[in-house]
Amino acid sequence: MTEALPIKRKIYVLDTNVLLHDPTALFKFEDNEVVIPLVVIEEVDTFKRDQNERGRNARQFSRYLDQLRAFNNLQQGVELEDGGLLRVDMTSHNLVEFHSINGQKADNQILSVALSIARGGDVRVTLVSKDTNMRIKADAMGLRAEDYEHGKVQIDELYGGQEEMTVPRTVIEDIYRAGEVEVDTGSLPANSCLVLRNEENASNTALARVKPERGAVSVMPRFKEGIWGIFPRNKEQTFAFDLLMDDDIKLVTLVGKAGTGKTLLAIAAGLQKTADEAVYQRLLVSRPVFPLGRDIGFLPGDIEEKLNPWMKPVYDNVELILDLSREKVRDKKRGYQELIDLGLLEIEPLTYIRGRSIPHQFLLIDEAQNLTPHEIKTIITRAGEGTKIVMTGDPHQIDNPYVDSTSNGLTFVVHKFQGEPLAGHITLVKGERSELAERAAELL
């Protein structure tokens, strides 16, 4: 019997943007070989003084390399805990056969390293880059190239937060009478929202939620009196209000296209829980247009004036909730400023959250799809005792060039917290802003 040949180790050449996105990428390639071209270290070095997420990642990457070099020379290679090998490629390569290529450009030097290694032996070399054009160029040169996949969640497989169950008529009757009923929910995650449908009469339904502690479901309130004048217009908004108003749920994620009411519902619930019920000390709102490091210093004025253009959508929602009169509308600050003066509402850039502990607050992060998974972790780990975090966003509307619909922090946290007893999620589908806005979201 012929002895099977050993599987050869794969070689992954990492682009700079991968390490700036996730410095722990060094350790994410199992028992294979990871190559860092010298030019990558030089590029990372240019970001180390930045006071943002890329700067912090650049410094963390440098610390990792500094720790690893204690075990062996980086050019020779350092064995990693999972059996892999990490080495820094110090050699100089030229793309002499590609006369139109600028050999001084950092991207082309990285390509040169990968191409040289691939041609140097019978090995499988893959360039890993988050830059689409870099992957295209690599493919044109005959190199295998792929995106950095760690932490990605396929958007079409994202947990939606709701299911439909067909049940006997007695279950519908019992849940309306007792408020709770035991049902075999199978593998449904905790806090999943349900539409219970009568098996004898499909139009006879009940809205419910899977209880986290046992195989039972509880009926969902209809919020007929509304919350701060906001009434749910569809079942998804009812589900959202139920999750937002449950103090036992500490993390709520609301995903949906523009106009589905994500931010409006969250602010209304936050005001109810702070101003009326005093469950939380204040409603703290932020949006990642300048998150964890994007500088707002170029804007004129004090911090409030700098924030105003970015936070205007939040102010608009607060003003709508407060149902301002025409006179108040003329005074742009009067409505929400009163809440700020009372200490019930606070608008703050995410930059200031790092290093803080935030206890007893209703923390709303709007447009969270523009955050990276690491930024999401930074925010959630700031939550102190008695704090509820709500994250809203649309994974299909991303302005951050370093994430996409599959790698952003919002989809990441939805996936990771699926089924956690202290977390709840719902995807809002129907636009309720206006008929025109709904059609625009569908057609454009």
Image (tube, rainbow, N blue to C red):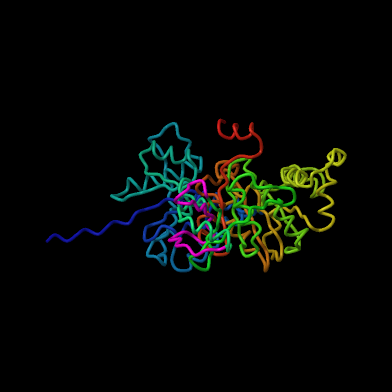
Q: In the rendering, at what x and y percent does residue 112 appear?
A: 42, 43
Q: In the rendered view, tell whether residue 72 sits above or below residue 263.
A: below
Q: Residue at image x 84%, y 52%?
A: 338
Q: What main secondary structure does the magenta stretch of the protein show? A: loop
Q: In the rendering, at what x and y percent does residue 303 appear?
A: 79, 50
Front one among 133 and 104: 133
Could you tell me if residue 54 is visible in this image?
Answer: no
Q: Is residue 182 magenta?
A: yes
- Image quadrant where residue 31 sits: bottom left
Q: In the rendering, at what x and y percent does residue 51 appear?
A: 66, 54
Q: Residue at image x 80%, y 43%?
A: 300
Q: Residue at image x 45%, y 68%?
A: 71
Range shown magenta: 180-204
Q: In the rendering, at what x and y percent does residue 387 appear?
A: 67, 64
Could you tell me if residue 87 is visible in this image?
Answer: yes
Q: Quadrant of the N terminus?
A: bottom left
Farthest residue to the left: give it: 1
Front one among 265 and 93: 265
